[in-house]
Image (tube, grey):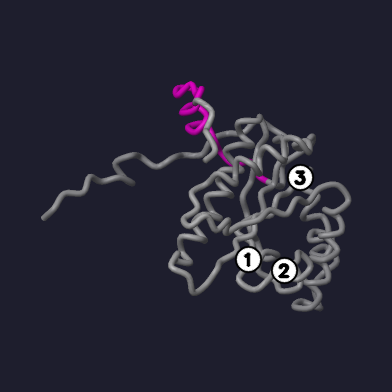
Amino acid sequence: MTQLPPLNIAAPQTLDLLLSRRSGSAKAMRGPGPSDDQIKTLITAASRVPDHGKLMPWRFLIVKGDARGALGDVLVSALMTTEPETTGERIALEQRRFLRAPVIIAVVSRVREAIPIPEWEQQLSAGAACQTLCIAAHAMGFVANWITEWPAYHPVVRDALGLHAGERIAGFIYLGHPVEPLVDRPRPRFEDIAQEWAPK
């Protein structure tokens, strides 16, 4: 059995990190994005999420450089299959969609059926991988935006990304730096979201 290294975590700093995390709009990102080594660290962190049955019900597709424009071409082709009368403005928007950030990581949820592990738990694990990517990016000084939008659900896009049966996009995680300083949004009050359960 692999021996885990001793923990060296400063709890207050970790909590400050979690309490300060927020999303940054993919429409307002700039470079530089994470380096190859940083991307490897991000994905390694994301792979440590809870995973009932050790199924690894997720995988990661890294989209960067010229591949972003190539995926934009796929979006245009997909769009034309369902909206052939679309405008040139919309086509240009979709062509540039994945150019909004320097790096995008697509988190693919892959569910195994007919096994004791509930499908819902497998899907939740993929969601946890998305969130961990966002937290790890924040720890590195980047901003992240977890979104899906229509490309995540279009069969032409799914085919181009090489998704198999039982797989779907849990999220596209856009990574970069904010064009302008982020302003936090109002957060829910503890009293509105948490209640102590007691037996009747």
Where in the figure is residue 150, as x and y percent of width and height? 67, 65
- Residue 29 percent coordinates (x, y): 73, 40
**Which quadrant: the C terminus?**
bottom left
Specify few, some or many for label 2: CA neighbours under 10 Å numbering under 14, 14-19, or 20 or more: some
Type of amino acid at the residue the image marks with label 2: Arg
Q: What segment is highlighted magenta in the picture?
A: 7-25
Q: Element at badge 2?
A: helix
Which numbered circle lies on residue 158? Answer: 2
**Which residue is pictured at 60% across the width and 61% down the height?**
109
Mark number displayed over residue 103 = 3
Using residue 93 as the reference point, say whether residue 173 is left or right of it: left
Nearer the N terminus, badge 3 or badge 2? 3
Please tell me which residue is depicted at 56% across the width and 38% down the height of the picture. 22
Label 1 vs 3, first from the N-terminus: 3
Secondary element type, mark 1: strand
Asked if disc 1 and disc 3 are in contact, CB closer than 8 Å, the reply is no
Residue 12 belongs to magenta span: yes
Horizontal and vertical percent for residue 110?
A: 60, 64
The reply to whether callout 1 and callout 2 are in contact (CB within 8 Å) is yes
Neighbours of disc 3 within 10 Å: few (<14), some (14-19), many (20+):
many
Distance of label 3 from label 2 (alpha carbons): 19 Å
Image height of 73 relative to 62, above or below: below
Q: Verify whether residue 109 appears in magenta.
A: no
Q: Position of residue 127 (x, y in %)?
A: 54, 54
